[in-house]
Image (spheres, rainbow, N blue to C red):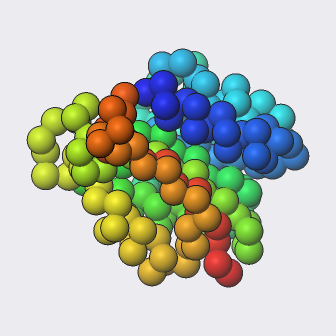
Amino acid sequence: MHRNNAIWFAYLAGKYRQGYGMDILELGAAEDTGIIRRLFRKARSYVGVDVVKHENVDLVMPAEQTVFVPGSFNYLISSSLFEHTPNWREIIKHNQQWLGGRHGRAFFSFGAEGNVYHPPDPWAIVPVHEFLEYVQQIGFVAVECFFEDDRYGAECPGAVVVELETAT
């Protein structure tokens, strides 16, 4: 995880009392440091999903194939997964159903325009406007959006962290 993503996720964890009493689903959980799980350490439950076995992963499976009882989680978290898959829309839509009704939260980070850390695959960059339009279409409302702009000497240009809330 890039250092600035860790700072943004630390901010969100502080904002939500380290996930106190919440049920969290993390997609793409095989992140080297395990920092997201540690930041949200006060969660009532925490399930990490990834396609590879790792100490931070509880379920080894593709994110678009998860199966839980609808409404099982309050928070849906994913850090730097979407720029590694062509089907990021399917992953978001599929996992949205596990969020519990109104005020379910989603925290996503991904590489967007200007990101220099990912290969030039046609799906490796997720345009911010396209992402925000899509999540609004499927029932999310953007609460906060952090975008690292290269004009200001950004450490990780093109990195985006978005906080979303379910509208219904």
Where is residue 96? Give x, y as percent. 56, 65
Q: Quadrant of residue 86?
A: bottom left
Q: Is residue 58 visible?
A: no
- Tally of numbered tags: 0
The vertical placement of 36 against 83, above or below, is: above
> Which residue is depicted at the point 37% across and 64% down?
131
Image-based side of 146 in relation to 149, left or right: right
> Where does the N terminus fall, quadrant-wise?
top left
Q: Find the residue positioned furthest to the right.
A: 21
Where is residue 160? Give x, y as percent. 42, 48
Where is residue 166? Give x, y as percent. 64, 71
Closer to the camera in the image, 93 or 5: 5
> Which residue is depicted at the point 58% across and 23% down?
34
Closer to the camera in the image, 154 or 143: 154
Image-based side of 8 in relation to 70, left or right: left
Image-based side of 39 in relation to 29, left or right: right
